[in-house]
Image (spheres, coloured by chain):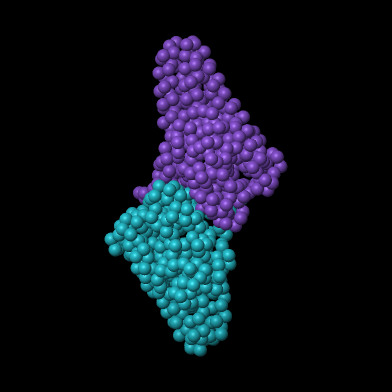
Chain colours: A purple, B cyan
Amino acid sequence: MRIRTIDWSKGAIKIIDQTRLPREFKYIYIKSLKELWQAIKVMQVRGAPALGAAAGLGVYLGIKDLKTDSAARLKKELDRVISYIGSSRPTAKNLFWGLERMRKVFLLHKDKPVAKIKDYLLKEARQIMEEDRVACRNIGRYGAKLINRKDTILTICNAGILATIDYGTALGVIYRAYEEGKDPKVFSCETRPMLQGARLTTWELNKLGVDVTMICDSMAATLMQQGRISKVITGADRIAANGDTANKIGTFNLAVLSKYHGIPFYIAAPESTFDLKIKSGKSIHIEERGRKEMTELFFRHPIAPAGVKVFNPAFDVTPHDLISAIITDKGVIRPPYIKNIRKIILK
Amino acid sequence: MRIRTIDWSKGAIKIIDQTRLPREFKYIYIKSLKELWQAIKVMQVRGAPALGAAAGLGVYLGIKDLKTDSAARLKKELDRVISYIGSSRPTAKNLFWGLERMRKVFLLHKDKPVAKIKDYLLKEARQIMEEDRVACRNIGRYGAKLINRKDTILTICNAGILATIDYGTALGVIYRAYEEGKDPKVFSCETRPMLQGARLTTWELNKLGVDVTMICDSMAATLMQQGRISKVITGADRIAANGDTANKIGTFNLAVLSKYHGIPFYIAAPESTFDLKIKSGKSIHIEERGRKEMTELFFRHPIAPAGVKVFNPAFDVTPHDLISAIITDKGVIRPPYIKNIRKIILK
């Protein structure tokens, strides 16, 4: 089974509409910047690495039809497009990393004809996707070395095929271990409020034949207490210079539980997720999302009194001292992170 | 606002149908044992203390129309009724405690005329309810002493009016603190899979004017990290002789998080929740419930692939060393529990 989360096709950004999963597997074609902004906002496309690709393709989509021969005019439009895409979701580093790569490519070629610059921009967007494909496989290769036969691995949200181009970060590690015959078993936290674990992670693991069991987020503690979890692996949205890691809300919870139970807790993420300009997690901006995600569940049925107050942060920050190792495409980074991240991540 | 969760009325057990909340506030009248069994199973009535009352009323409902003058015949029917009600849910101690109280009343009066015995049984069922009303107010009184002005209290599931006759255990403490003008603020975990926190706790706190904010279960860790929780209080379904406490799935998770963050973690429960025959939580039978509660959310919309494996324990066990104190109707019990529970709980 071959699944590709995002691509450039027929003059549009082709994505799987992830809000329809698991009920329906459907590609949609995004032909305008506004559609892309909306698709990111409502999470038709999501996952830090996939957002990096969406940023690259989005910039090209935003400028490709601009009728001008002036690079200055192109730059003005490019700035507007980059700023607009960047306003869709604030937490994942990869989105901004993708946007900055596109800006750099423009600056590198700004003296060339506009048509040529546009070609370079599309090429760069494709390059981002190709690099992610390679990076995820490297994460898988490095990470699988940490996995033993018959490990039972807990994960949250979706850091798999559907969060990347076609392989995954945390799930990439599991896929590689599976390919190596290590027969890992997976428990997937359903991941309230948007249920990426219930909808997406179980779906893709099922498709690929990996044994997966769904739990409610609150059940992880019991599984650990019963000795049924040997490792925890999650993805990341942004990693600070000291290793503090922003990821889907609930990740920090799992890290505390892992510490209490003496279970290794791993983060898996490509280099593009690191933000070395940020010293610690304290400076990571956490997106707070709308109330209806919580009060009306995923499909519009009210589950709380009208007008109830809610707190709906999309991410949390796991302090570096709870993280056993960070599995990257450049190798596995262990504490002390403040030193070892800089050795491996060169940005 | 006066809310009564369960009562005997018009020859039937009158309950609020809690599966309809918060959309609809509706009393239903349970006229057969089978209806009662079903109501407990699907949680139209739930909460450990309310189940104690349901047990008492259920026994009377089950035998009141028995046409016999023979106490032996009545006993046979009583045994059948007790065993049947006991099969509805296995974890809450109060259910079995209520059933045993009814059995004892029969044994005490078994030499009296059958009509008289029936009267005694109804009287005992009413007595169970009255005692719960008093017990909850005592829990509130003892517990409120632990609450400071402007405390922000996290709770899970519903241990309030809707889990008791008309006041609550964990929420009883909050109501009393509120009545004393301490202005507590509450965060309510939504409590997957059945969403008692989202549906019931927010509903009743709103009704009574207590400030409440709903969170997903996975967000508690972030609130604690931000210093926004000063205390955690939950109810209990069964408390072992050493203080290990079974309660709604997710409670143990909160206890571990509280320990990590240095936040007091309290259990609130009446004497009837203690099971001193059980040495530790290891012997507590944890109910595993059906898959659809998880895969179809609360109202039948699929949120996971068909056939996905699930793990759906209804309760978890919090080890006594994570519990700061147990607030009971007889006073506040602190560690060492193995000694101090026996001093206060006389059963």
* Location of the N terminus of chain B (image quadrant): bottom left
Closer to the camera in the image, A70 or B196: A70
- Image coords of residue B181 (percent x, y): 28, 61
Residue A307 drawn above or below residue A236: below
**In this rendering, does residue A266 appear at all?**
yes
How many numbered circles does the render carry? 0
The residue located at (55%, 48%) in the rendering is: A189
Residue A12 drawn above or below residue B274: above
The residue located at (45%, 55%) in the rendering is: B258
- Image coords of residue A272 (percent x, y): 53, 31
Residue A219 drawn above or below residue A140: below
Q: In this view, does B135 lie to the left or right of A114?
A: left
Closer to the camera in the image, A343 or B183: A343
The residue located at (37%, 70%) in the rendering is: B138
- Image coords of residue B17 (percent x, y): 43, 61
The furthest residue to the bottom: B111
**In this rendering, does residue B60 appear at all?**
no
The furthest residue to the right: A181
The residue located at (44%, 62%) in the rendering is: B324
The furthest residue to the left: B181
Rendered image quadrant of residue B283: bottom right
Closer to the camera in the image, A144 or A34: A144
